[in-house]
């Protein structure tokens, strides 16, 4: 059986990580979290260039220079695992790429993914629940989101993924999470 790709998407605080880790366990797949793969390097690069390491949503420098590198690195590591015959679960927002229908086709070619079934798991959560979760978890990286909630939600809360050639599964994650 060829390896599978599971991509778990949703806004910060939606429960992506919980769902992605459960999916990795269920399918005995490699778990690849974008923040774990490249987060420390991104924070260092933002600090070294005089930017706030916790604000990525409103930071043009981050979006133009570091975000593409984060996702390229994640997809490269996924490709290595897939070529070794190991299924992968990717845990990342991916919002910057939702509007590109051929994004995954291009990535699969660029990073030499073998032919794989791709399932995108969209983690859904209502706005009020998401805001409560971000407030409760109290992470520095969520402070910009909470301080600019209307702007944040108007963009990131309504993003719809237009990727082609994938199976979509919706997961309503309104139930309390362990962090709650």
Image (cartoon, rainbow, N blue to C red):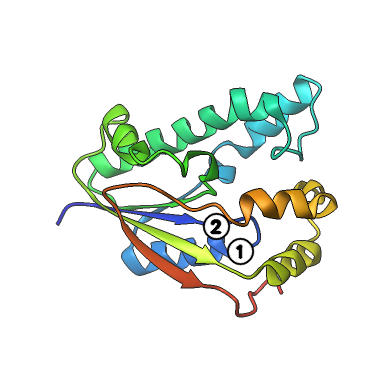
Q: Which residue is rendered at x = 72% and y = 70% of the image?
A: 128
Q: Residue furthest top?
A: 49
Q: Which residue is rendered at x = 36% and y = 47% of the image?
A: 163
The local crowd at label 2, few if under 14, some if 14 to 19, many if 20 or more residues have their Cα within 10 Å, is many
Q: Position of residue 178 (x, y in %)?
A: 65, 74
Q: Position of residue 172 (x, y in %)?
A: 51, 74
Name the foreground residue: 36 vs 145.
Answer: 145
The mark found on residue 10 in the picture is: 2
Name the foreground residue: 38 vs 108.
Answer: 108
Q: Which residue is rendered at x = 24% and y = 42% of the image?
A: 84
Q: Along the horizontal axis of the image, is 4 left or right of 41?
A: left
Circles 1 and 2, Cβ within 8 Å, touching? The answer is: yes
**On the rendered image, what quadrant is the N terminus found in?**
bottom left
The local crowd at label 1, few if under 14, some if 14 to 19, many if 20 or more residues have their Cα within 10 Å, is many
Residue with the mark numbered 1: 14
Name the foreground residue: 46 vs 106.
Answer: 106
Q: Along the horizontal axis of the image, is 150 left or right of 79?
A: right
Answer above or below: position of 50 versus 139: above
Q: Position of residue 119 (x, y in %)?
A: 33, 57
Answer above or below: position of 96 versus 142: above
Q: Find residue 168 and report its image quarter.
A: bottom left
Whole-Å distance between the Cαs marked 1 and 2?
6 Å
């Amino acid at each position: 059986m060829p390896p599978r790709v599971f991509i778990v998407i949703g806004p910060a605080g939606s429960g992506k990580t919980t769902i992605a880790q459960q999916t990795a366990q269920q399918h005995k797949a490699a778990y690849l979290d974008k923040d774990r793969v490249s987060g420390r390097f991104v924070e260092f690069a933002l600090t070294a260039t005089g930017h706030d390491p916790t604000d990525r949503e409103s930071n043009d420098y981050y979006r133009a220079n570091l975000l593409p590198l984060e996702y390229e690195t994640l997809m490269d590591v996924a490709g290595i695992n897939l070529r070794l015959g190991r299924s992968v679960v990717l845990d990342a927002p991916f919002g910057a790429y939702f509007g590109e229908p051929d994004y995954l086709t291009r990535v699969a070619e660029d990073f030499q993914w073998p032919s794989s079934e791709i399932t995108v798991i969209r983690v859904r959560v209502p706005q009020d629940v998401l805001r409560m979760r971000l407030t409760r978890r109290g992470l520095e990286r969520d402070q910009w989101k909470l301080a600019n909630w209307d702007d944040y939600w108007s963009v990131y809360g309504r993003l719809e993924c237009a990727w082609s050639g994938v199976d979509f599964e919706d997961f309503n994650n309104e139930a309390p999470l362990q962090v709650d």
